[in-house]
Image: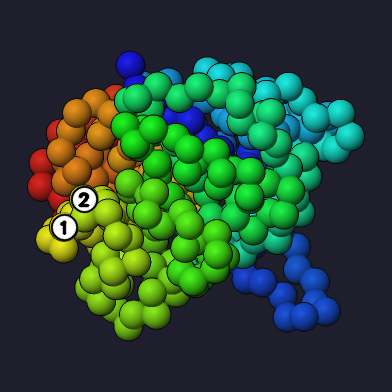
Amino acid sequence: MSRLIHSGQVIVDLVMSLDTLPATGGDVLANSASFEAGGGFNVMAAARRNGLPVVYLGRHGKGRFGDLARAAMLAEGIEIALAASDNKDTGLCVSLTEATTERTFISHIGAEGELSAEDLASAVPHPDDYVYVSGYSLLLEGKSQVLLDWLLALPRAITVVFDPGPLVKAPDSALMVALLPRIDIWTSNGPEALAFTGARDLAGALLKLNDHLPAADTLLVVRDGPNGCWVSRNGQAQHVPGFKVQAVDSNGAGDAHAGVFITGLANGLAPDVAARRANAAAALAVTRWGPATSPGTAEVDALLAHRPESAE
């Protein structure tokens, strides 16, 4: 059976909801606050809740945040490939969600920011596995090069999924130039695709992504908020409509989409069908507070049954 092997970073989110961010030097009271596992955990939890076996191929620290991250992963049934690091705790992200559902992040990297060739050698992906790569990993000096070397040595039968995240904004860095030919699936939101390509609209971004990703059959998935997403392969783009809901927190919605989309592909669904399930999962996720709010299979099925046609 296929697995999702996540090579990114699990961190702990300090999640706070507030009416609006203060001006520089200002002060406001949050409406709520809690510590939650986040980062790469969100994608893994989404996939696991929808039936896909998941392996976390990343480091985690010793300390209160590492304990919280491990407990969350074990509760979801996620396999932890590596032992805890001795000299650092897991990192922290302050996640601020305003009443508009807009999110602001401030992150500090911990043990998850490092990886060795020996760590990666302990993982032996199967031919039908999906290896998930986060753009954040390419920004980490203690991880990026060894991860890239490992990815480029993987057999072609193993599917590499790339999520650029908001900080990878250019295709011409040495690491990106090396990685682009190995990407089988690109998954991002619209602003990330626009920033990466320099395009003015999503149609232009999809075309430019095809130029940057030389493999002819690379699958592109670009999310468009409540409008759903675009799925493209071989230059043929298809819009998959979203679902109208009352959003309260957009944190983790893209991760829910990515995890459920990969699970759909692993179960043999066509990309547009997998995307429709992913759109449903993301729609449910934004109705809930917190980072790892992906629904499970039964909830996705129920929404699809209740709304057989998603909203144009």
Q: Quadrant of residue 41?
A: top right
| Amino acid bearing label 2 | Asp
Between 41 and 128, the residue placed more toward the observer is: 128
The x, y position of residue 262, in whole percent, is: 33, 37
**Residue that label 2 marks:** 217
Label 1: which secondary element = loop
The x, y position of residue 61, in whole percent, is: 79, 33
Between 162 and 284, the residue placed more toward the observer is: 162
Residue sitting at x 67%, y 24%: 82
Q: Quadrant of residue 150?
A: top right
Describe residue 51's horizontal placement relative to residue 121 as left or right.
left
- Crowding around mark 2 (Cα neighbors within 10 Å: few <14, some 14 to 19, many 20+) is some
Describe residue 24's horizontal placement relative to residue 301 as left or right.
right
**Residue that label 1 marks:** 234
- Crowding around mark 1 (Cα neighbors within 10 Å: few <14, some 14 to 19, many 20+) is few
Residue sitting at x 32%, y 46%: 184
* Mark 2–mark 1 CB contact (< 8 Å): yes
Between 142 and 283, the residue placed more toward the observer is: 142
The x, y position of residue 193, in whole percent, is: 38, 67
Per the model, the C-alpha gap separating discs 2 and 1 is 6 Å
Q: How many marks?
A: 2
Q: Quadrant of residue 276?
A: top left
- In this rendering, does residue 48 appear at all? no
Nearest to N terminus: mark 2 or mark 1: 2
Residue sitting at x 22%, y 39%: 274
The N terminus, quarter of image = top left
Residue sitting at x 64%, y 58%: 139
| Amino acid bearing label 1 | Asn
Colour scheme employed for the rendering of this structure: rainbow
Label 2: which secondary element = loop
